[in-house]
Image (tube, helix red, strand yellow):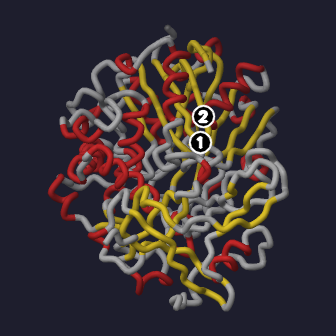
Amino acid sequence: MAAQVEQMKPLPDLDDPVSAPFWREAAQGRLSFQRCSVCGYLRWPAASLCPECWSPRAEWAPVSHDGEVWSFGVYERAFSAAFESDVPYVVALVQLDAGPRLIGKIVDVVPADVTVGMRVTAAFESFADDAALVNFRGLRSD
Amino acid sequence: MRLDGSVAIVAVGVTEQGKLPGRDGDDLAIEALGYALEEAQIGKEQIDGLLTCKAAGTDAGIDTAVGRKAGMNPAFSATLDYGTCNFTLHLAAMAIATGMATTVACLYGTNQKTGRKFAFTAAAGDDGSPGAPYGFLHVSGPAALAFQRHQALYGTTEEQLGHIAVASRQWAKMNPQAIFRQDFTLEDYLASPYLVRPLRRPDVTMISDGGVALIVTSAERAADYPKHAVFLLSGAQQTGLRLYQNDDQLMRPWIAKVAERVYADAGLTQSDIDLLYIQDPTSVWILQMLEWYGFCGMGEAGSFLETGAIAPGGTLPVNTNGGQLSEAYMWGWLHIVEAVRQLRGECGERQVADPKVALYCSTKGFEKAAATVLANEVP
């Protein structure tokens, strides 16, 4: 079951028709991006035009949940009161096997165990009835 | 942009730096212009170009508002909404080269310390990338990721990075204008708390109030000014506007293109640079740009810093004002002021012996980079 995000945190705008499907898909346990209907490019962040061919047409396409940690940092200080109870927390830039690079927390881990190059998979964290954030947790090799 | 010394900085003006409660950002910019005009011994009516720079997180720095407040009707004016002065300086040079203006005032002023809360606490990368819900806040976030990546690829240590904050302070201690001048050693650095591990508080810029102004004109006109002119040999830029779509976006490999152009257009190489200025919202920017501008090999910045190269007495004086880590946070503008003062030989105790050429490198987040080569003689 997905954890519940506290309401005071800055949350994605679910009224934005361009990006909202990303968070709605995540609530269904899917990591999906807009795949350009013309050239196939995966858009991230979500956008109303393909940055490659400028076509507005796209379908939300589920991709692999896996990737690797490009790099990470451990927040020892909260820059917003909303994150005070989370400190220390790990934020990583994850290079997805599917192509896009996502920022997310690395959850269910001791910060000292996170490494650059570590294999991770998406871990969904709901913040509304039908919307979730995309965090990551380590992929076990055993 | 090849300039061959055809454009020059003929005057600089700087207000008090620090906490200036009750002061307005535009008032501070105009006060700084007053000092620059005094140094140039001209009146405001001789300024026919006005370039202002928006101050992040505040309303200050709009040309139309500044012109009204300062009582100026220049022929040409514009606002840039990113700082570091390099972008403004290049626009000033283009305006002079094309005849849009002859005498350009470049202004920056902010009360972001005591006025409105500055946006560094906002999401890292104000670019539509949804980092904020994950707590990816403040510039030390992406900088920590960039440094952690550098460590993983090249074995760079926190102690090596610490040499940047320590050297900045050693320079600042000789700069009466600097806000942080107390002793600060590598041991102090290593004992400082982390903000976003592996970055510590001393790796990140202070926030302060103040104003800065420059007066830029053609080399021909520069001869009529009382102070020794500082000439622009070249300027170059490159963007990485695709940001999160770019490979290695936090490492910014496209900065190397700026280096290639700025040296080629100046007709010189790294070895000709006597003074290096790098705009430093965090120490990591200095680490990266030492490599991209070729002062050491890729991945070798850590061992280069360990030699004490950038500190007083070292082989490559960097940020001789103390930079944003120790002098003040004027979004890079004081780096240009320091380059001008060093090239004029006005820096007293911290004066570098007989410098001829300075390079100033800056970036706007992970989206734009620029550099300028300045010299005290036309080649």
Residue B238's label in the rendered image is 2
> Quick one: B154 or B266, which is closer to the camera?
B154
Q: The residue under label 1 is which amino acid type?
A: Lys
**Please, is residue B196 above or below residue B337 in the view?**
below
**Please, is residue B36 above or below residue B134 in the view?**
above
In the image, residue B240 lies at what x, y percent? Answer: 60, 42
**Res B185 visible:** yes
Crowding at dot 2, Cα within 10 Å, few <14 / some 14-19 / many 20+, comes out as some
> Quick one: A139 or B344, which is closer to the camera?
A139
In the image, residue B307 lies at what x, y percent? Answer: 18, 35
In the image, residue A140 lies at what x, y percent? Answer: 35, 72
Give the CA distance from mark 2 to mark 1. 6 Å
Residue B368's label in the rendered image is 1
- Residue pictured at 55% horizontal, 74% vertical: A134
Q: Chain of mark 2?
A: B
- Residue pictured at 47% horizontal, 70% vertical: A121
